[in-house]
Image: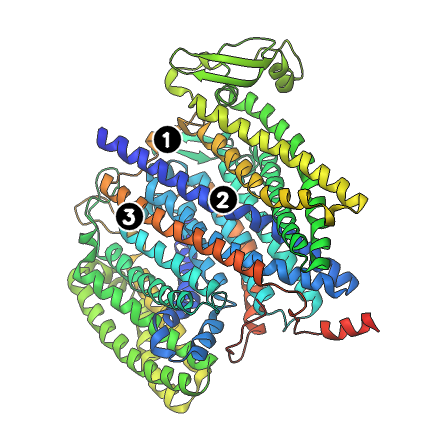
């Protein structure tokens, strides 16, 4: 395997890591008003992600940095091409950061705290939806000029196929947020989360099936790798298996296994797309060359240096992240933590 | 062409605005993280609950600041690709690696351990708390190292070749690119600037409590930390800052000439204390200077000639007036900081500070000083490098994304709106936390209660 392919996989790992970890933060934020009805419940929900959300978000920043370093042409094309959409994601992330950090700090000013709650909701909803839309566009293809710049407009990005992928992405985050809430809370809020898990597993099944057919029509190139290497079908089959398992696990009350299932759903959803795209990173629709892991990448030396950095750094990251999750295991409480 | 110019200008304004606001929070994060780690260390060592209360109190304020710093920091990573696609394509092979390293080695560290320090305080041992505080400080410091390495490469590019076919810079040596000629001195300059700022922040808030006769033990002790910090690092900063300008003279002569409004190449070059630069006629309308001092400061020799702006084609000269003023603002405020902390140190030694109304009130008023000095420093760094985005290699105009004026106007308006709200929110919460805090009712939840009993009996 060449370095370019290794970086394709590493980038996939970072994106999947982000989607799994920050996925439940985003899901919980979007479900903030559906899950929590009382002030105590709202506080509990914020505390459920409070200690870890910041570290989770770093997966996105690192994925962004890795994309810049390993595939700078792709980073430049996508970030400048999707300019206004990126701005929306960015403001979403800014609002979410502020809302979680300041929710308890605005406690004695109910209006301000209410505003923080709204920012938490909108700041989680925007990225949850737009990540899928962005991936939809990359998959279905965008028009590129001879300098590799995106030559469409903001509204071209909101095409039906990409919006459908946005829904698939959103449904995944909502499901994941609900299963995480089941694990971290008790009582009424847990009951609501159980109901929502049922609802979103159905929404996800429907949108996922629709997405699969729509891809056959709008982005048939995504099936090429699958027909050439049928073993790849194991990835979407895992998604299906997990989606079937979710209602069963819910009925049995195996909540720990439930979150493993929703984690796998998110991981294999992204894996399914990645396997179809390889070795492309951005498809073009107007006959211009696709951006691939070869023509979009950095030099061999940079890829090698970056690989060493990842080999040294990521095991450490995983080790202390695991430790911190271990410290914060168990149910979340509504109290303010000394700050 | 006009369209393109608008996009370039608006992109530059947007970058300037977003980075200045972001850097309003960064130095305090770096400096206060180090101070808090020192307090945690004292607590771990002495078990004196005062240090515990100090660490907790300053962590409270640290968090208010950190929230906005984090939020405005996400923008920076997005913005290279969004607004500077040409730049990203040209330098991605070199510039991307330190950014990714910053994520892997620094962001994870600070973000993960902040969660542990704040939410886990009562779940972990004192030793683990110290470790978490040290990791947060290490994370913020490493973060500044990597980003300064990347920015230094823009000032003094090294370890690369130009690939004509792909029209980009390619790395030939990672070590040379990261440790390019200006990385270390600029890293120290930035870190010391951050420590001084955090010191001044601690001084100002402690002064406020001493004036209000509230939280006095905490304020007295914190005041000492702030003064020692600011004093030590501002004196070291004078030396580092001086070495840095000497390096700029060597590596970016046009920049230094703009800082000094120095037009003619000449020996015995004067250091101008006051002047009105006139770019049109390539001279200064009025100047007062110390003869030979610029040559002496730059090369250690009065007779050595310093390159003047006239050596450079007109379109490769930085804006003179703005850089000249900002450079003097940075140094002027830097000197104020040094003299003021020396004065405070004497007051503390004589034990008269707590009752010295003038010293306390002025300390509070001087809080903006290091903020202004840091900002002015960054303005000359980036503005003085123009018209280059990578000095001598790539012009800023060639780095900008192909966007429309409308897109830029929309994003800029949103940035100004959202960032104003963030600034307001941050100051509002900071003031509220400071006013509300009362160390007598602020009872820590963990084992420190027993420690207090032990100490009092």
Left or right: A169 as drawn, with respect to A18: left
Mark 2, residue position: B23
Q: Chain of mark 2?
A: B
Where is residue A201? Give x, y as percent: 30, 79
Q: Earlier in the sequence, mark 1 or mark 2?
A: 2
**In the rendered structure, the residue with mark 3 lies on which chain?**
A
The quarter of the picture where residue B163 lies is top left
Residue A307 locus on image (x, y percent): 49, 50
What is the number of the mark on residue B396? 1
Mark 1: few/some/many CA within 10 Å (<14, 14-19, 20+): some
Q: Secondary structure at mark 3?
A: helix
Are discs 2 and 3 both within one chain?
Answer: no
Labels 1 and 2 in the same subunit: yes
Please name whichever residue, B146 or B260, is drawn nearer the observer in this view of the structure.
B260
Locate residue B129: give its quadrant.
bottom right
Residue A211 location (% of width, % of height): 22, 68
Location of the C terminus of chain B by quadrant is bottom right
Element at badge 2?
helix
Given residues A178 and A124, the one toward you in this image is: A124
Residue drawn at x 47%, y 13% as measured from the top left: B284
Q: Is residue A69 above or below residue A183?
A: above
For residue A319, the mark is none
The answer to whether residue A2 is visible is no
The residue shown at (58%, 49%) is B30
Residue B436, how many percent across, how many down?
57, 63
Q: Which residue is mark 3?
A: A83
């Amino acid at each position: 395997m060449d370095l370019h392919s290794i970086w394709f996989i590493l980038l996939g790992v970072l994106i999947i890591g982000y989607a799994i970890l920050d996925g439940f933060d985003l899901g919980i934020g979007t479900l903030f008003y559906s899950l929590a009805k009382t002030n105590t419940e709202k506080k509990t929900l914020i505390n459920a992600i409070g200690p870890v959300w910041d570290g989770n978000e770093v997966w996105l920043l690192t994925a962004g940095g890795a994309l810049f370093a390993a595939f700078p042409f792709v980073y430049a094309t996508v970030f400048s091409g999707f300019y206004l959409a990126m701005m929306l994601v960015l403001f979403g992330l800014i609002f979410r950061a502020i809302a979680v950090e300041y929710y308890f700090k605005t406690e004695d000013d109910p209006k301000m705290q209410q505003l923080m709650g709204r920012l938490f909701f909108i700041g989680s909803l925007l990225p949850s939806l737009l990540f899928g839309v962005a991936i939809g566009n990359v998959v279905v293809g965008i028009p590129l000029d001879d300098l590799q710049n995106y030559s469409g407009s903001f509204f071209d990005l909101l095409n039906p196929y990409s919006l459908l992928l946005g829904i698939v992405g959103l449904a995944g985050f909502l499901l994941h947020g609900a299963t995480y809430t089941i694990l971290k809370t008790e009582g009424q809020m847990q009951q609501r989360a159980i109901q929502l898990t049922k609802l979103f597993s159905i929404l996800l099944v429907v949108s996922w099936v629709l997405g699969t057919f729509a891809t056959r029509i709008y982005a048939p190139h995504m099936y090429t790798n699958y027909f050439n290497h049928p073993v790849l079908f194991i990835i979407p089959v895992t998604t299906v298996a997990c989606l079937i398992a979710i209602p069963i696990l819910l009925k049995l009350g195996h909540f720990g296994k439930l979150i493993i299932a929703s984690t796998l759903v998110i991981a294999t959803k992204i894996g399914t797309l990645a396997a179809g795209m390889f070795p492309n990173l951005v498809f073009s629709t107007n006959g211009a060359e696709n951006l691939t892991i070869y023509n979009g990448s950095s030099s061999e030396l940079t890829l090698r240096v970056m690989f060493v950095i990842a080999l040294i750094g990521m095991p450490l990251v995983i080790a202390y992240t695991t430790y911190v999750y271990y410290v914060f295991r168990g149910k979340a409480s509504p109290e303010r933590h000394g700050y | 062409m006009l369209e393109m110019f608008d996009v370039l200008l608006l992109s530059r304004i947007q970058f300037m605005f977003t980075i200045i606001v972001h850097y309003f929070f960064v130095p305090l994060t770096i400096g206060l993280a180090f101070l808090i780690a020192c307090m945690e260390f004292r607590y771990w060592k002495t078990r004196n609950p005062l240090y515990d209360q100090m660490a907790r109190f300053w962590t409270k304020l640290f968090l208010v600041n950190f929230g906005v710093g984090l939020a405005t920091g996400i923008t920076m990573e997005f913005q290279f690709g969004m607004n500077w696609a040409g730049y990203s394509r040209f330098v991605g092979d070199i510039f991307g690696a330190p950014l990714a390293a910053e994520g892997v080695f620094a962001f994870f560290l600070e973000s993960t351990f902040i969660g542990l320090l704040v939410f886990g305080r009562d779940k972990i041992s004192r030793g683990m708390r110290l470790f978490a505080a040290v990791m947060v400080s290490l994370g913020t410091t490493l973060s500044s190292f990597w980003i300064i390495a990347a920015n230094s490469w823009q000032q003094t590019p090294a370890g690369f070749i130009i690939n004509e076919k792909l029209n980009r810079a390619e790395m030939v040596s990672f070590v040379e690119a990261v440790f390019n000629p200006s990385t270390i001195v600029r890293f120290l300059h930035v870190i010391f600037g951050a420590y001084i700022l955090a010191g001044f922040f601690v001084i100002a808030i402690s002064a406020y409590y001493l004036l209000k006769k509230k939280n006095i033990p905490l304020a007295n002790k914190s005041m000492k930390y702030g003064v020692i910090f600011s004093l030590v690092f501002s004196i070291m900063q004078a030396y580092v800052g001086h070495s840095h300008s000497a390096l700029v003279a060597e590596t970016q002569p046009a920049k230094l000439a703009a800082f000094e409004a120095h037009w003619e190449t000449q020996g015995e070059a004067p250091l101008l204390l006051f002047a009105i630069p006139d770019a049109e006629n390539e001279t200064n309308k009025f100047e007062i200077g110390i003869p030979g001092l610029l040559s002496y400061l730059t090369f250690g020799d009065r007779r050595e000639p310093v390159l003047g702006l006239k050596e450079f084609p007109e379109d490769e000269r930085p804006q003179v007036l703005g850089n000249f003023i900002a450079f003097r603002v940075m140094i002027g405020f830097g000197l104020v900081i040094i003299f003021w902390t020396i004065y405070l140190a004497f007051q503390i030694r004589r034990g008269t500070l707590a009752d010295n109304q003038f010293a306390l009130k002025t300390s509070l008023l001087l809080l903006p000083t290091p903020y202004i000095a840091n900002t002015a420093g960054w303005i000359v760094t980036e503005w003085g490098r123009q018209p280059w985005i990578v000095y001598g290699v790539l012009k800023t105009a060639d780095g900008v994304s192909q966007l429309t004026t409308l897109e830029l106007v929309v994003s800029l308006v949103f940035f100004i709106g959202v960032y104003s709200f963030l600034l307001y929110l941050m100051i509002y919460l900071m003031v509220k936390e400071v006013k509300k805090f009362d160390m007598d009712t602020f009872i820590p939840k963990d084992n420190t209660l027993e420690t207090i009993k032990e100490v009092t009996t």
